[in-house]
Image: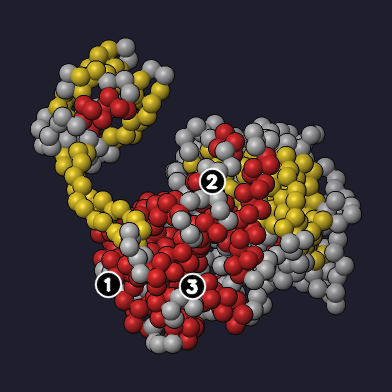
Amino acid sequence: MAVACYAISEWVVRRFSVALVLLGCFTLSWVTSAAGQPTVAYRVTITTAGDAVAAVEMTVRDLANRSTLEVALPAWTPGSYEILNHAKHLFDLTASTPDGRPLPIRRRDKQTWRVVCRQESTVVLRYRILCERQSVDANWLGETYGQLVGAATFLYLPDGRSVPATLALQLPLGWEAATPLDRRPNGDYVADNYDALIDAPLVVGQLTRLDFTVRDKPISIVLTHRPKDPAGLQTAVAKIVEAYADLMGGLPFKRYMVQYIPFEDEDEERLEGLEHANGTLINYAPATLLDNPRAKSLLAVTAHEIFHAWNVKRLKPCEFADYPLDRELYTPQLWFVEGVTEYYAWRGLRRAGLVSAEDWDEAVQIALSDVINNPAAKSVSLTDASLATWLVGTSNFEDIPLDYYRKGFVVALMLDVELRVRTANARGLDDLLRQLLAEFPEEGPGYCADDIVRLAGELAGRDLAPFFHRFVEGTDELPIDAVLAPAGLSVLIEPLTELDFGFELAPTSAGLVIAEIDPDGPAGKSELEEGDLLRTVAGRPVRSEDEVGAAFARLRPNTPVKLVVLRDKRLITVTIVPEAVTTLDVAVAPLSLPTPEQKAIRVALRGAE
């Protein structure tokens, strides 16, 4: 997401009109310049709570008599592999000297501008950002809280991303800020360079914090309201961090911040997460979700994003060593970045004692079911899927032919079992990750695909290149039975035929409403409309999901069925012809009589029963 993003919905780009925000005089904060190196100071002003516009000031100092200065806004947010064109939300950009004399500025392309410096040593740029899209890779401001994503907010110097920066904030009365950046005594935040600045999500508003430590490292949970069980939430996050510290040999950060920011006015469960070096921003709905700190969906997203502190933030693919911000960043390793991380989300939760062994089995079953029932798994490799994600972006993840999260999860499990079988359970995927961390330091060039193959082979004591050729670079069918049996698990796969009506129902106080219609399904070919209240199915009254299920169970595919719906206070009869859809139903369970070797691997993977 990555965006490790979950249940992402589409948004509507709306026309807008905004009132002019008058910028007053600002007291600038500077970083000491070294050997004539430019420095950058940012100031963000949010004038009024509820205003969807943030004003940004960027001051570049010590330009050493340059005639021109180029600035740009990233085309994408690192971790969310999608061209978002953040510059479409930037407007009213001006350039001037510190005393207010205008300097010429001209757009060079969709996201880059050139300032004529006229030998000035200091240039001040001012602009405004529209903050109306709430997602972990974009900016949003509401009545009582908001979130600012660095890549969508701060202009940068294309030839000076290594320049240090400071950040000052001016917020509405009663609002505060939270970000994992270092803070100076005067209240300004400081970043070693631009990449560090945008790798620190900023939340603002009326906030609540839970602060604690794990292994002497400060950990913070930032929320917009106090949940019913704050101690339970804190304990869950602490256990996740501790479990990964145990597994990976320590913590890769000096502090960490988990920011839980609710989607505004959403009642259905929805979760998005985006990893950062020293924290994660998680958007969620409904607002009551945090009241249950043991909710598996919340735990899984939290664990996934925290494990990214090791896998992708500390341990990087070689393509990430020097990545562009103005265009796509291609790597064939997203399956390892995201799929392995998803596997370790559940490994970590199990090690932390936050989910049961049966929950772990269910996670395996869901991933297997997704892969087995996805036709693209037979034609699209994990390598290809990693590259092709830019075609649709993570905001439209349902349109990606192959989900490298789920298939990556399964291949990670297969590789873990393969290593354990080859070494009599002495080595596993944990050891491969630790070896990668040891061999590829944080400031190094990062690992490549061949490095994973090489180190896996060294751990296994045999060449594992054929494994990666078949299941990562290729599209061979995954040998599920052969993989799970050595791990002491059995899998049962059976065809399951269900009726497809082509619509989704949502419960309301008035009954079941037709919430969504597939235009290519049976409902799309009928006179049914979204918003209709379902009243009867084949003459049987229905008011609950159980009643609908009982009515559907009596029907046959390709046979017309009369539905009665309430629309605009009128009862309307609609005829629909349901279709038969056959999928493969997957069940995973422990073998009843495992061998000692099978049981040992099973316990290593999913813990003791």
In which quadrant of the rendered view does residue 406 lie?
A: bottom left
Q: Earlier in the sequence, mark 1 or mark 2?
A: 2
In which quadrant of the rendered view does residue 277 lie?
A: bottom right
Q: Which residue is mark 3?
A: 429
- The amino acid pointed to by label 3 is Leu
Q: Earlier in the sequence, mark 3 or mark 2?
A: 2
- The amino acid pointed to by label 2 is Leu
Q: Position of residue 287 (x, y in %)?
A: 57, 34
Within 10 angstroms of label 1, few (less than 14), some, or many (20 or more) residues? some
Q: Which residue is mark 2?
A: 298
In which quadrant of the rendered view does residue 469 lie?
A: bottom left
Which residue occupies the foreground of this view, 475 or 602? 602
* Real-space CA distance between mark 3 and mark 2, rounded to the nearest whole angstrom: 25 Å
Residue reaching furthest to the left: 559
* Real-space CA distance between mark 1 and mark 3, rounded to the nearest whole angstrom: 21 Å
- Label 1 close to label 2 by CB (< 8 Å): no
**Mark sitting on residue 147:** none
Q: Residue at x 86, y 61 (%)?
A: 30
Q: Earlier in the sequence, mark 1 or mark 3?
A: 3
Q: Residue at x 64, y 71 (%)?
A: 249
User: Helix, strand or loop at disc 2?
Assistant: helix
Q: Please tell me whether mark 1 or mark 3 is closer to you in this view.
A: 3
Q: Position of residue 496 (x, y in %)?
A: 21, 47
Q: Position of residue 459 (x, y in %)?
A: 48, 83
Left/right placement of residue 529 relative to residue 462 reads: left
Within 10 angstroms of label 2, few (less than 14), some, or many (20 or more) residues? some
Which residue occupies the foreground of this view, 90 or 83? 83
* Real-space CA distance between mark 1 and mark 2, rounded to the nearest whole angstrom: 33 Å
Q: Which residue is mark 1?
A: 476
Left/right placement of residue 309 relative to residue 551 reads: right
Which residue occupies the foreground of this view, 469 or 238? 238
